[in-house]
Structures are given as C-alpha cells and as structure tokens.
Image: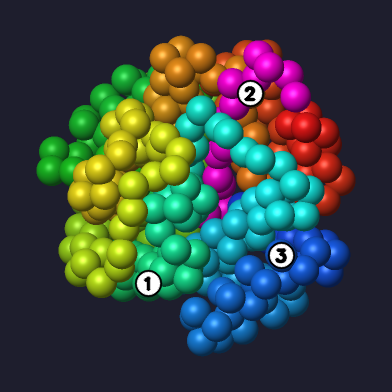
Amino acid sequence: MNENLNYALVFPGQGSQTVGMCKEFYNNFGCAKNIFEEADDALNFNLTRLMFEGPEEELTLTENAQPAILTASIAVLKVLTDEMKIKLNPVCVAGHSLGEYTALVASKVLKFSDGVKLVNKRGKFMQEAVEPGVGSMAAILGLSSEEVISVCESVAKNHECQPANFNAPGQVVISGLNDFVDMAVNEAKGRGAKRAIKLNVSAPFHSRLMISAANKLNEEFKKIDWDYPEWQIISNVDARPVEEPKEIQANLFEQTFSPVLWQNSVEYMADKLKINAFFEIGSGEVLSGLIKRTIKGINIKSTGTPQKLEELAECLR
C-alpha cells in the first residue's frame, strides 16, 4: 500500500439506486449475500428482490431507496474487508444525507440491522411530512452558493424555499413549497444560472417542511444503542468531525431539515485532514463526480462492480 495515501471512505445518498444494484456481489460473495438476507430479515420484507428485479418506481420510493442504498454499500464494504482481506484504516468517513447513516454503520456507531430499519422509517417519515405535490426540489447549476442563498431569500421570507444540498461548486439543490421553488427557479435563470431544473423527487427533503419527520426520527433514536465511532465521521450539518453519540444524534436530527454541506465537507477533508484519496463505497459514482468538481486532480475510486472493488483492493494492499 502507498504509505502516503490518506484516504476517506464516502457513502452515497438517495439517487444512487438502480434496479440490479450490487447483484454481482450477491451472486459471487457469501458475505455480501448475508448482508442482503440480514436486511430482508430486519425489514420483514424482500428488499433484495426489489433491488434486483424492481419495479424501478417502487425501488425509487424513499422508504425503499434508503435501506437499499445502505444495504448495497455495506455489502460492498464487507466484500472488501472479509473476502478481499483488506484492513481498512481511513482517516475519516462521510456520507451524503442518507449516506451519513451508512457511514455510522461502517464506523460501528450503529448495528447494520438497526441502521437499515432506521433509514426505512426515515424514508416513511419524510414522505409523510408533506402531502404529495405540496413541496418540491430543484437543482441550480452555474451560480455560487452565495447567489443561490440570495435567490432563496429574495423569494421566500420564512424558509418557504431554502438551499438543501451544497453539492459542489456551481451545483446547489433547493427545496421547499412548490410555488416558491418555481419562483426561485425563475429568479435563478434571471440571474444567469446555466440550468435551473425541477427534480423528480417525492418530497422537499432537507427543508423546514421536514421538521415533523425529524421529531419522529428523534423518538426512534432513543430506541437504539449508539456507540462511539471506530473511524472519524464528518457531519453533513457543519462539515466537521463528530464523535459523541449524543452529538451524532443531534446532528442527524438537524440534518433532516437542514442543508447537506457536502462541498464544505469535501474541502474540509482535503484541506484540514490532508485527504488525498476518496473511495466511494456502494452503487453508482454520484459522489465521485461531485468530488472531482470540488477538488481538481484528486484520487477517486468508485466500487460499484467487483472489478472496480478489486482495483481498490490492489491499491490498499
């Protein structure tokens, strides 16, 4: 292994789900199959079949997509550690929104079965928080973070529309009440945004409309055993390390209705923790793309297939 490698493990959020995700891992590695079976048992329904066979509309429902993405990432991680015999020693771990829960499972703060049940409930609570059609989200491309904040403030005085994800330079997602999001999209276009497009999502995530979901989640937190992290975790809420279990829970509560500071997190990891490699664990390459836009020339590897995971394993041997 390259002794100068200071790496972070990062875990994707909602949007990384696809029918057939991680099926190769299930078919070829017993430890991965065990993770899928444990998820099915914990949830008391056949998540594995939904992940491998669809239908896509059902997999995309937030209460299904969230446990599916978490399960896929942990299955891939298990293959890396148990089958490929890689002893991991990341400087830190982080996840995008839902992915923060995966990071907590990976870092032994939460047991896998507790984590998968928790994000299934998180999805349900988030969906129930707002009637369909009342809220929406939009991606604003080509404006700075400050400009998008200004756009939201100009159309909404009481958080009816707010930034939800600071993903990368020139890429911010907004969230809120449908009419206000529409106004913000038009305002952003008027200010020179390259693109301002409504997203095909089922609820206005990471907005103040999610406070009822956060309150329900808080009650679920009390039913679970939380431990101190094995690896340093970077929080979405403030883009800083978090260690105390109570603080982790407080941040997850706030994360539900606050923006995901992903760009800030990546910059903190690179600048303050001297991370020189990011390894995206799980399905897809969404985070790899965002990190490339944020830190030019950084070493990034994704792990969505056994072949790609083997390449990472070679890098870590």
> What's the residue type where badge 3 is placed?
Ala
Q: Is residue 112 visible?
A: yes
* Residue holding disc 3: 32
Q: Indicate the secondary structure of the residue bearing disc 3.
A: helix
* Residue holding disc 1: 121
Distance between the alpha carbons at the discs numbered 2 and 3: 25 Å
Q: Indicate the secondary structure of the residue bearing disc 1.
A: helix
Give the side of residue 49 with respect to residue 254, left or right.
right
Give the side of residue 201 with respect to residue 7, left or right.
left
Badge 2 or badge 3: first in the primary sequence = 3
Badge 3 or badge 1: first in the primary sequence = 3
Q: Are marks 1 and 2 in contact (CB under 8 Å)?
A: no
> What's the residue type where badge 1 is placed?
Lys
Instruction: Residue at 65%, 51% (x, y): give it.
Output: 77
Q: Nearer the viewer, residue 141 or 264?
A: 264
The stretch of residues the image draws in magenta is 1-15
> What's the residue type where badge 2 is placed?
Ala
* Residue holding disc 2: 277
